Amino acid sequence: MQLNKLFSAVMLFGMYSLLSAALFVSLDAVDVALTEASVGAGIATILMLGALSLTTNRQRQISWKRRLPAALVTVAIGVLLLYGLSDLPVFGDPAAPAFKHVYPRYAFESPHEIGIPNMVTSVLASYRGYDTLGEVTVIFTAAVAVATLMGHGSDTRSFSGEGMEHHLILRINAKLLLPMILLFALYVQFHGDYGPGGGFQAGVIFAAGFILYGLVFGMSTIREVAPPKIIRILCAAGLGLYLLVGLCGMLLGGNFLDYNVLAHHPVHGQHIGIMLIELGVGTTVAASMIGLFYAYAEHEHRQ
Amino acid sequence: MTTEHFPILQVVLPLLAAPVCLLIRHPRRCWWLAMTVSAATLVISVILISTVYASGPIVYHLGSWAAPWGIEYRIDRLNSLVLLIVSGIGSVVLLFAHGSLGFEVKRSRQYIFYTAWMLCLCGLLGMCATGDLFNIFVFLEISSLSMYLMIALGYEHRALNAVFSYLVMGTIGATFFLIGVGLLYALTGTLNLVDLSNRLEPIAGSPTVLTAFAFIILGIGIKAAVFPLHWWLPDAYRYAPNSATALLACTASKVAVYLIIRFVYDLFGPGFSFKSVQLTEVLLAAGVSATLLMSTVAVFQNDIKKMFAYSSVAQVGYMVIGISLASVAGVTAALLHMFNHAVIKSALFMALGTAFVRTGGFSIDQIQGMGRYMPWTMAALLVAGLSLVGVPLTAGFVSKWYLILAAIEHDYLWLAIIVVAGSLLTLAYVWRVIEAGYFKPIPNHIEQRREAGAGLLVPLWILVLANLYFGIDTSLTLGAAHGAARALLGIAQ
């Protein structure tokens, strides 16, 4: 399908994300689905719309001569990928290496070792917790980069973006939705041990609540509720919390990010460790997303 | 805290410094913090490399989970050398950044630069130290994103265009890498490099392994600017702040080359890389064309910074030639050149940064007669330039000498001739700089110009003297490179 209107492209992109989320649910990857729905369909769409409002809505026409090499490269990569897929294990094959090697310990030992039912959280937060620290750092870096390049990093400039407060229906609905969004975010944050969820998704949902508030009640109001300075501190603090949990493990005689030593009983230690790092993740992600929204909104205002 | 935690501390200290820098916001205090942390990483990497040579590889389990379930750091002869390059050059360039940044980046944004610097250092060291394939991807992203930010802080508006093409190319590279990682995981069920290498051996003939290999090498090849995947590089180097250019050219690209060596020789193994896949021919073609074509392009540049940027692509070509030979001599030459080129290029880019403080540009006309009013800077440019050419008694000579020896060992006389031809082309463009600096009169319109301050000259000359030192005493560099190459190819010590 070819579209020249970028707005429609963004909408299609959001739908695509939502459909993939549905696909992930049917594949029993509920955690991935929740992430895709909140990040891909939710916050990414908002950010892309923000970017559209700063540029034009029309795609520039490019002659087919310039597109041809790109098309050839794309086809070549596609053929290579198909060739590569030919020897992959059959879908759902229980004898596939992915189910045979490291998987059994994650699936069958983690309830004793980590003590929480959601093994996705066990892997993300504990077995491979260091990767998650890296991912949080990536988000932190991206937020700092975008805020610097778009917002020029200033806190003090007066700002008077118009809200949509005069729309009665919008206002009432937003007021109704807001507490539920924030409550749901907290549920996703703290229920990640038992069901799908965790810091990443919760942070994004939390930020979505703030963004909705900002859109309806105006930028000056949201900046009073969540001043950019606080947002920046929280963005750094979340990452700092994660790192400190890791260093605590080290100071208490374990290795970096060893949660077993955080309490007298290893499983209890794992609980504390995972809760704290998830809190760190949620804080940094929420603050980063709100910071990104500020950066776009301020840039638009300046133009 | 004992020495056992050093592998992780080296990576985590810069990571911890990054959010702190963001909160401090005061440029000078941020620099002090960053400098302290950077010096600490240097000390740690010296201790690590000596420990590795004394008692073998160091393994560190993150979260105390044993590999392959958890992530492990594995420091051996190869990556301890790269860690030393990154932390060493990073520290000297950061010392230089203190003096040069004020001329390029607004004071109110300098703390962002130091935050990005710390993140980048963390990412680069993390990529080297880790023994986990997915962990490499995560830290690759950290170092790339922070590098984009540093380039974008360049004072010219075109820095944004340059960084955008780098961002697009870099993201494609990272995605290719991730596709390769995904395919390998589906095939083997593990992400640990040692484990993966063992489990790949029986299934080496599979088309999926071939595809994964292609995606991983292409992805990292983009990051390392291996010809012809280098299109992003000249502009990115040209418009970045000078200290960031030195960091990018001397650490980021070296880590990418390290990853190529690690994957080709360690993960997939020379048997797969050079027998199942005809990698020798591919890499040799890429390396030779890089050396000849990019050196020729560099000769015709009137912008010195861009000239040295193209020269970097050519020099990566030398390393790729060394890698392609699949022998101890070849890998030794590649590693030696990795180290020596880091020392050479950081000195060159820092010399340009020092000149920029007075001239305000990089055009070859702007340095006319610089030898008279900035003698120390121009002398540094001369020595580092000769080292780039490969004149005896400089570091550049040593690595080219060993590359020629490796080529002759394979009976590739033509290759030895190409290496020498590349050096002659290098002499041609370096000579243009020297001629302008020493033999052209000072233009009349220049008012009283004087030498740059000691804050810039001291770090610059540390590296210039390093060029001379490693050109005369090769026991350290050659020993480390040779030891790493032998360990990689599985030859007993």
Image (cartoon, coloured by chain):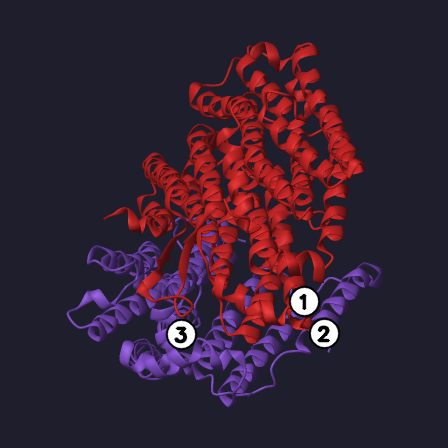
Chain colours: A purple, B red
* Location of mark 2 (residue): A83
Question: Residue type at mark 1?
Answer: Leu
Whether B280 is drawn above or below A3: the answer is above
Can residue B152 be seen from the camera position used here? Answer: no
Chain of the residue under the numbered disc 2 shown in the image: A
Where residue B87 sits in the image (x, y, percent)? 43, 40
| Quarter of the figure with the N terminus of chain A | bottom right
Query: Is B164 left, or right, of A155 in this rendering?
Result: right
Question: Residue type at mark 2?
Answer: Tyr
What is the distance, in whole Å, between disc 1 and disc 2 at their CAs? 9 Å
Where residue B205 sits in the image (x, y, percent)? 68, 70
Residue in the image at 67% along x and 67% along y:
B211
What is the distance, in whole Å, between disc 3 and disc 2 at their CAs? 35 Å
Residue toward you, B397 or B163: B397
* Secondary structure state at the residue bearing disc 3: helix
Whether B463 is drawn above or below B413: the answer is above
* Location of mark 3 (residue): A201
Where residue B9 sits in the image (x, y, percent)? 33, 49
In the picture, the disc for residue B243 is none
Counting residues from the start of the chain, the first of labels 3 and 2 encountered is 2
* Location of mark 1 (residue): B210
